[in-house]
Every structure is written in C-alpha cells, then in structure tokens.
C-alpha cells in the first residue's frame, strides 16, 4: 500500500550536474500525464520530450509508468520500458529529466537527497490543468494498464496481439494497417542495413523490402556509442580491416581505400596500411579504420541501394505470427509524422528479420545505487553515455583529480587513452584502474594449443578475434557443436578484450613509471559522497581479497566501462516475443546470465517458423549461437549472407543464387556506384 500524497522531485541535466527544478505532490490515486504540453499534469518543458510522453499511474497498491509511444522513449534507471511498475529505487528518466520518488518516514517527514524545493505544485485538477479522471481506488496496476477504459496508447498492441497467431484479414481491415511487403526487418540499424544490402545485391527490388526503426541513418546508434566512448570521426574504430559493412565482397577494404587516398596526395607513408593488413598480428599491429571513413562509406552504399525508400520510421512494440503464414509487426510513429492521425501502425511481411542490437547499457548495481542516492552529483558515468563533462572539468581545472576506470576491455583502454591525452593540459590527473581479478602473465585463456598473451592483467586479443572464427576450424567446430558444447568452446576462447596496441601499452608503462596510473583488484563494497577541501568526492572501499587489507580510494569521477547489456529480456518487444513463442535461448557466454535467441547456422529462428514464412535474427541478440563474434561488422555480414543464401535455396521471391558471374557483375556495379 502506498501513502498519499506522493512527492516527486524533478531534476534536469544541463551542462553540469543534475539540478532539481521542481517538487510535485500527487494528492490522490489516478492517471497523471507526463509530457511537453501544458495540458499534462507533469510538464517537462524540453524539445526532446514528446507532447504526450508517458503516464504515471498511482494506485493504492503501487505506482506504474507507461510510455505513450514517445520519440525518445522512457527509462527506469538504464532500462527502457514500455510499461512497468515503479518502486522508486531507480529514477524515471525522460530526455534530460529525472523523476525521483521522495521517500517518507512513518511520521511523514520527507527524506530527499536534493536541495530545498524551488516549487511545490498540487495536481488535483485545479484551474490551468486538464486532469485525467482518477481511477477507482483499490484498482490494481495491472488492471489499470489493461482495463477496457484505459487509453489506447497504453493498450496497444495488446488489444490486437492478444493471441499468438493473429488474423491477417482483421489487421488489414483495422485502423492500424500500414502496408505489407515480402521482406521485413526490425531494427533499421546496421544489422538491418547489411541484410537489406545483401537482398538488393541478390536481386530483390527495394519496393519489396522494409526496415522499421528509430533513425533513418543506420549507424546512428552505433555512432552515438562511439562518440560517447571517445571515438570521434578522426579516431580509429576497434574493428579490423576486413569488416566493410558497405561492401559485401570486402575488397577494396578500408586499408586499400586509405592507402589510395594517401598516395593520391603523395603521402607514401600510407603504404603502411597494406603492410598492417598482410602482417597482422605477428609482424604489425592490426589495421583499424577511422570511424568517419566507415560512416561516409555506409552513407554512399545506403544511397546506392535506396535505403531511404525502404526505411520506415517507428518504434517497434510487438511481433506476432499471422494466420496466412506471415508476420505482423506493431510499431508507433512520432506525433509529427502522424499529423493528428493514428500513431499506432501494423505492417505485415512474409520473411522477417530481427536485428535490434544491444537492449540496454550496463550499470553495475553499486554505481546505479550511488546515482540514485546523489542525483545532483554528476560523478559516476557509464562509458557509453555522454560524459564529456568529465574531461572538460579535469582539463580546465588545474588541481589534482582522480578518475576510477572500471573494466579491462577495449572501451576501458580507449578511456584511459583519453585521460592520458587530458594529462597534457593537467599533469595532476591520476587514474585508478579497477579490475575484478588479477591475471598473471601465463594465466590467459587457453584453447587447444593457443593461449592469450597477458599484459598488465589484461588479456590481449587481436581485433579479428581470432581469424579462425570467421571461416576456419573454429567456425566449423562451433557450427557442428551442440549448444552446451558451443558454450564451453566460447568459455575456453574467452570474450573479446583489449587488442595488443603499441600506443596503449606505452601509456600503461608511462603511467606506472610516473606513478599516475594504478591498477586495483576486486569490487568496491562502499561508495559514499564525502566533503573535502577540494569539494565533494567519492570515497570507495575495495573489498579485501584473501589476507590482503581493504584498499581505499577517494575519486573525483568514476567511469564504468563494463559494457552493454546483451540480455534480450531487457527489451520489452523481444521479451514479449520470447515469452509468447517460448523461444529457445543459447547457454550463457562469458559471464552473461543468459545467451541470445537460438538460431540455426543459417540464422533462422526455427521456433518462429510459420508455414512457409521464415524469421531470421542477427547481431548481439544471437549471442552464443553458431558464430562467435556476432556483434561485429563482419558478424552482421556473415549472418546476412547465410540467411540470404537460405532464402535463395527456399525459392523466396526475386532472390537469386549467387554464382561467380552474378557476384562479379554486382561488384562492378558497386565499384561504379550503380544501383544493384
């Protein structure tokens, strides 16, 4: 049972830390609208907030949050939600705003980590508001979310997807029907783009292909992650030279293109890129392309294949089989696109492709709890969120600063490199590198006769991780293995870690020698905000290991580089799909609690087979499947090639078997920038 009134603190992030802008009181149970327009009971005035963004549902048995098909979505903590109960442990995040539930003692005294309220507003349907009618007292949250009188924004697509197999005729006759196609991809990111690229080159006209997603630029989300993890356009990606998502043949690759560009400008040093490709990783460190070069090449290929004509803007909410051996995808478009019309849409396709990427960013529990307790202190960040304020602060302020970097993967190496660059402006920056366990020089993962090289407790692995997983003996072995055997193979090989980059190794050597880089091991058992003469800092106590004493660190900032969440259950749409059709899951891989969706070597989700209809998947959501590096550029291309070949064997419309002559003619078209 909840205690009324409910008090909410609204915080907003600007250039610096979160600042509380308002305290709101919810006096009774009911449905409270959140959005940009003044007619909402909870107004968040920013362009990134939709006009009607979300519902906050207050009932006597608890509180729930329901997204209303917003453009920039609604989150509880770092988890995107469609509808979810809310206990206040983590804040509700909408654009640059955070909504915190203010705790109350039994005596009614308010507990809040914020400053004095700047405004208090009772939401009881007074003049100037258009309050929604309060729901009957005692009505449960689940009833409120699914009641016949509930707003359609909350109920869609449950009102049309109540069964595992839905009527195609009923959908086509209903108000939501938006069209049908032969090949339908969900995600519209790099995975969808690569699949559409293969289909076009295999002979499918663009009118038969549709890809539904949030952004017409297929690499938009990947670019954002790169930018936040300090890989701007001029920096090199952590992907090897044979990964060319704009070119299914892989030649000319990025190394060849960069060399040719240098030679045209009489820069003969560019020949080193070719040497890197042929000499990696024994004679030279791996070549990796600049992110800006990759994005520009994808733009060119997108224009060549007609990507914009295949793209459909929308947020996918649900997927169902239809009774005519096809698949229905429910999605919601933005208010601006709807222009006052129906925002909820359904599209039907014969062959389904799912490539939604990582469902969420990962934040370890202790850091998330710290952020919730001290929302105004912008001192803890995930490496994949915008944390440019950290570098700006420590570069502009010449006094001593300590930054804790958590994790030992590729992203951690890049963050350490960025902090090393910041030391050029502030020589008083100290890096504390937290890793869970130490790794000795001879303790790297061993698989058969191969063993990983370890430097500074970090297992090095070339960017091609390893080449045999692309077309050699490891690939053949894992394809033949059972899911359980496959998981053991992956565990023995180990996950992708930091490549053996000479510049990264030099930074560590210089840092240890200069005393400004220090590795520590274990988990921090306490994180407290303390006041010092230099301002607020984070006091961290490291849990003792064995007979060692507990280490203590006082830091200015913490950057968590432990990665992204690959568990499909963090995606409301994928969770609903998996539960509805009882999709098989791969065994866990490399510390993840669960693996991805089970697929065949052709990347078909056999559990979703619908008569002659077929469903395929690609990317991180197939983690632990028949190909190791599923979330890399080349992994997406491999999955697209296998599924396109499979469709050709099945005799799918307009898709041809890809022989040498057709392949060569299509490559010539690529070289001359002619449409497939």
Image (tube, rainbow, N blue to C red):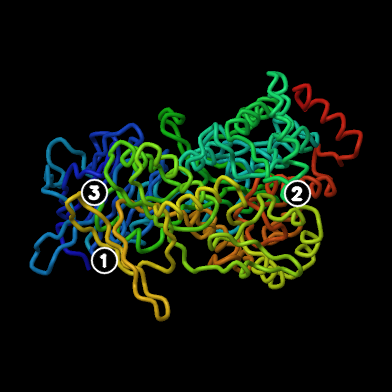
Q: Does residue 335 sit above or below 142 in this rendering?
A: above
What is the x, y in percent for residue 93? 33, 48
SS type, badge 1: loop
Mark 2 crowdedness (10 Å alpha carbons): few <14, some 14-19, many ≥20: many
Q: Which residue is mark 1?
A: 61
Query: Considering depth in this image, is 350 or 646 the residue closer to the camera?
Result: 646
Q: Which residue is mark 3?
A: 376
CB under 8 Å between discs 1 and 2: no
Q: Rounded to the nearest whole Å, what is the CA distance between mark 2 and mark 3? A: 48 Å
What is the x, y in percent for residue 647? 79, 47
Residue 175 appearing in the image: no
SS type, badge 2: helix
User: For residue 482, what is the image quadrant?
Assistant: bottom right
- Which mark identifies residue 643? 2
Q: Does residue 610 sit above or below 419 in this rendering?
A: below
- Report whether 307 appears left or right of 139: right
Q: Rounded to the nearest whole Å, what is the CA distance between mark 3 and mark 1? A: 30 Å
User: For residue 292, what is the image quadrant?
Assistant: top right
């Amino acid at each position: 049972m909840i205690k009324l009134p409910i008090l909410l603190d609204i915080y907003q992030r600007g250039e610096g830390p979160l600042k509380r802008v308002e305290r709101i009181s919810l006096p009774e149970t009911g449905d409270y609208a959140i959005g940009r327009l003044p007619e909402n009971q909870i107004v968040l005035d920013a362009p990134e907030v939709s006009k009607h963004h979300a519902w906050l549902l207050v009932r006597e048995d608890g509180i729930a949050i329901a997204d209303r098909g917003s453009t920039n979505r609604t989150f509880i903590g770092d988890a995107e939600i469609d509808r979810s109960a809310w206990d206040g442990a983590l804040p509700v995040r909408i654009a640059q705003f955070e909504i915190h539930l203010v705790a109350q003692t039994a005596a009614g005294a308010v507990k809040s980590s914020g400053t004095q309220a700047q405004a208090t507003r009772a939401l009881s349907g007074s003049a100037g508001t258009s309050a929604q009618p309060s729901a009957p007292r005692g009505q449960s949250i689940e009833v409120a979310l699914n009641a016949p009188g509930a707003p359609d924004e909350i109920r869609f697509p449950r009102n049309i997807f109540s069964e595992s197999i839905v009527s195609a005729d009923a959908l086509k006759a209903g108000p939501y029907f938006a069209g049908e196609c032969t090949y339908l991809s969900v995600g519209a990111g790099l995975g969808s783009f690569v699949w559409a690229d293969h289909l076009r080159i295999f002979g499918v006209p663009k009118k038969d292909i549709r890809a539904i997603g949030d952004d017409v630029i297929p690499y938009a989300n990947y670019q954002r992650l790169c930018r936040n993890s300090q890989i701007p356009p001029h920096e090199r990606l952590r992907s090897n030279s044979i990964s060319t998502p704009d070119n299914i043949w892989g030649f000319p690759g990025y190394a060849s293109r960069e060399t040719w560009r240098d030679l045209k400008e009489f820069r003969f040093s560019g020949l080193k890129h070719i040497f890197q490709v042929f000499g990696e990783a024994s004679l030279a460190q791996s070549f990796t392309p600049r992110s800006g070069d990759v994005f520009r090449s994808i733009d060119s290929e997108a224009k060549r294949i007609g990507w914009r004509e295949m793209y459909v803007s929308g947020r996918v909410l649900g997927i169902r089989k239809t009774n005519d051996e096809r698949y229905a995808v429910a999605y919601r478009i933005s208010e601006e696109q709807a222009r006052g019309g129906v925002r909820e849409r359904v599209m039907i396709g014969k062959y389904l492709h799912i490539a939604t990427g990582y469902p969420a960013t990962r934040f370890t529990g202790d850091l998330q709890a710290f952020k919730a307790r001290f929302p105004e202190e912008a001192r803890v960040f995930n490496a994949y969120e915008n944390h440019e304020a950290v570098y700006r602060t420590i570069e502009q302020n010449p006094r001593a600063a300590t930054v804790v970097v958590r994790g030992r993967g590729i992203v951690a190496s890049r963050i350490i490199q960025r902090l090393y660059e910041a030391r050029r402006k502030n020589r008083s920056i100290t890096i504390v590198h937290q890793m869970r366990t130490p790794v000795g020089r001879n303790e790297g993962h061993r698989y058969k006769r191969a063993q990983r090289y370890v430097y500074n407790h970090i297992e090095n692995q070339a960017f091609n991780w390893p080449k045999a997983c692309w077309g050699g003996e490891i690939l053949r072995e894992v394809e033949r293995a059972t899911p359980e055997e496959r998981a053991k193979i992956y565990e023995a090989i180990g996950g992708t870690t930091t490549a053996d980059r000479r510049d990264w190794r030099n930074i560590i050597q210089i840092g240890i020698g200069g005393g400004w880089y220090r590795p520590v091991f274990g988990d921090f058992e306490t994180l407290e905000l303390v006041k010092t003469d230099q301002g607020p800092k984070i006091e961290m106590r490291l849990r003792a290991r064995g007979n060692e004493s507990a280490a203590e660190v006082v830091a200015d900032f913490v950057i968590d580089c432990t990665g992204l969440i690959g568990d499909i259950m963090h995606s409301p749409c994928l969770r609903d799909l998996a539960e509805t059709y009882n999709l098989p899951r791969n065994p866990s891989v490399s510390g993840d609690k669960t693996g991805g969706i089970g697929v065949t070597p052709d990347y078909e989700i056999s559990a979703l087979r619908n008569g002659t209809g077929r469903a395929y998947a690609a990317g991180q959501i197939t983690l632990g499947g028949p190909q190791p590096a599923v979330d890399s550029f080349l992994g997406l291309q491999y999955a697209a090639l296998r599924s396109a070949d499979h469709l050709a064997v099945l005799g799918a419309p307009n898709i041809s078997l890809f022989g040498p002559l057709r392949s060569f003619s299509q490559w010539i078209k690529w070289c001359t920038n002619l449409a497939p």
